[in-house]
Image (cartoon, rainbow, N blue to C red):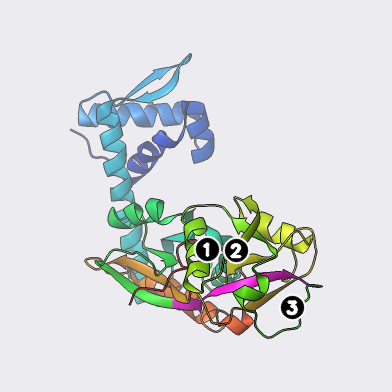
Amino acid sequence: MGQLTVRQLELFSALPRYGTLSEAAAALHISESGLSQAVSEVERIVGQQLCVRRKAKGLQLTPAGQYFAHRARHLVDEVSSLVGDLAATRGEITGPIRVGCYVGFAATVLPPVLAHFAGAHPKAKVGVRVGGDDELLPSLADGTLDFAVLYDMFLPSDLNKRVVYETEVMAVLPADHRLADRISVALHELAEEPLVLLDSAPSTANTHRIFAEQGVQPTVGTAVPTIDLVRALVGRGVGYGLLMSRPNSPDTTSEGRPLVTRPLTPRAGRTSVVATWPRHMTLSPRAQVFLDHLVHSLSRAGEPSHQHSDAPDPTSAKATP
């Protein structure tokens, strides 16, 4: 029996992402014949058929091939981690860092952080997965992610947490709104105006909870599924919005129309955005360096007075201790 190489494991572990051998070969920067030979050699070494290659039907892994690809990916990641960790002991950050980020704030919070980190550590390879808690928490549990950046709401108790920045619900108003020059606004002052509601679970229920806690009945004018649509409609004067504060959010809509954000009186939905990972796992040195960079970059920018807006998805209720 021959010996498997890391390159063979790397090639085979990537196969589930592609429908044909030619697609896989192009993405992996290898000739199709070279990839076919590598797959055949792996099958010879393990003594099983791992995939079915038919021109008409593309590439299909057998159950054994799916299992092998999954295990191979973990082994390749472990090798990369070992190399990266040894480099970190010399003060050099290299290798993969896998980070999850809540979809509501990823597009505005992460770009400057990633750009600055890439400049400081060009040999590090940061991969980002964007999604909701239901997608990111399982990836934490199975080790696919080093850590995830989430709202500190309804998280499992078996997670480590580190605060990245504080956040709260803000009123989002057109720049020419009658209350735009106020330092803060009260919900009862907005109640008769149309609310542009972010209509996504659990945003809708949590937004209504804020009103209920303050004894105010909202006038819902329009319900839309994305933050950008809320901001765009507010910028056009359709109504006002209630969104979570966040760093690096622009003062204009995607159409270039100006917005202002104001805290509520009394304050509402105050919580934290946290980096979190399983308690039984230890962050790799390079993941720790990236987390330190993330916190340093966002902690001051995340103060509500310097923030703009994001979705109140899981945080419109009081944060858990």
Residue 4's quadrant in the figure? top left
* Cα–Cα span, label 3 and label 2: 17 Å
Residue 252 shows which numbered tag? none
Disc 1 target residue: 207
Q: Nearer the viewer, residue 24 or 137?
A: 137
Type of amino acid under label 3 = Leu
Instruction: Of the two numbered discs 1 and 3 on the same chain, state the one appearing first in sequence.
Output: 3
Instruction: Of the two numbered discs 2 and 1 on the same chain, state the one appearing first in sequence.
Output: 1
- In the figure, is residue 20 to the left or right of 226? left
Q: Nearer the viewer, residue 253 or 139?
A: 253
Q: Is residue 301 magenta?
A: no
Q: Is residue 165 magenta?
A: yes
User: 10 Å neighbourhood of mark 1: few (<14), some, or many (≥20)?
Assistant: many
| Residue beneath the point at 36% across and 40% down | 13
Disc 3 target residue: 179
Type of amino acid under label 1 = Thr
Residue 218 shows which numbered tag? 2
Residue 249 drawn at (x, y percent): 65, 70
